[in-house]
Image (cartoon, rainbow, N blue to C red):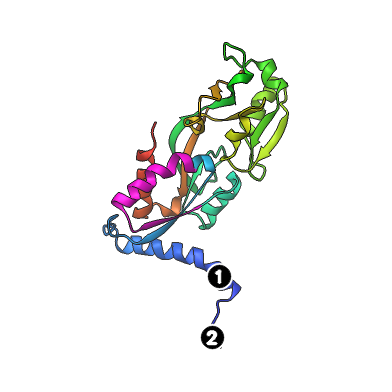
Amino acid sequence: AGLVPTPRALELVAPLAEALAQVQALLAPNAFDPATTQRTLRLAMSDYGAAIVLPGLIRTLRHEAPGIDLQISHGSRESMLDGVLNGDIDIAVGVFPEMPNDLRSTPLFEEHYACLVDRKSLPADGVLDLPTYLARPHVLLEMRGSGTPEIERALTALRERRRVAISLPHWSVAPELISGTDLILTVASRGLRDIDEQSLIVVPPPFHIPSFTFVLVWHKRRGGDQALNWLNRRIGEGIER
């Protein structure tokens, strides 16, 4: 009574769309116009990455490229890189200490860690010392095993461990868990810029955690894709240093 795609055809939808986009870019190398282009681009990022990247990028797209649509997904570091490698994702944004040879990246900014605690749970001087940090329970933002290994490595170097009382796969509710409790949340500092400072306070970690580079990643075979190159530039320009 009709035609339906086979499972193999469904598997080919994403790579075929990518291949066609590359062919179009090769045949019309000077034809890209953000104001008139009609296209969907697929980005992968964490909740933190979305909070940093998307507000400015969406405003830019609505003003300069209203025909470019975005599909946003998230996952572990490994799954995002796999998505870029196999063509399911056009751009990944995040922290990727190990990069496959077929991928290219550009740094967006340097980031460091900070601690979020209830203001009333600290002494009057507002200082969080190491014994207090280790004695109190912690909230961990973790997605499918990625977590924040940088924090654990820094504690291991001190031969110390922390107790994770709550492990969450997303950011949005985490700050609400801190207010009125003895919990500590240690995360990238930019994610704490809009915190309500009446009940909560952002303080430095009481031990050294190496800073990290937040990067934008794409496949080297997409180097001739002008729409992708344009979007990469706009993402970099739209992030407040």
- Marks 1, 2: nearer the viewer: 2
Residue beneath the point at 54% across and 83% down = 3
Does the magenta stretch mainly form a helix, a strand or a loop?
helix
Measured Cα–Cα span from mark 1 to mark 2? 17 Å
Q: Hey, what amino acid is under mark 2?
A: Gly
Q: Residue at x 47, y 66 (%)?
A: 16
Please state the horizontal and vertical placement of residue 228, each as a whole percent of the image: 38, 52
Which residue appears at 56% of the width and 88% of the height? 1
At x 62%, y 13%, the residue is 123
Q: Position of residue 46 (x, y in %)?
A: 54, 43
Which quarter of the rendering shows the C terminus? top left
Nearer to us in this view, 145 or 140: 140
At label 2, counting other C-alpha atoms closer than 10 Å, the crowd grade (few under 14, some 14-19, many 20 or more) is few
Identify the secondary structure beneath mark 1.
Answer: helix
Residue 218 badge: none
Q: Secondary structure at mark 2?
A: loop
In the rendering, which numbered label is found on residue 10? 1
Q: Which residue is mark 2?
A: 2
Q: Is residue 41 above or below residue 120?
A: below
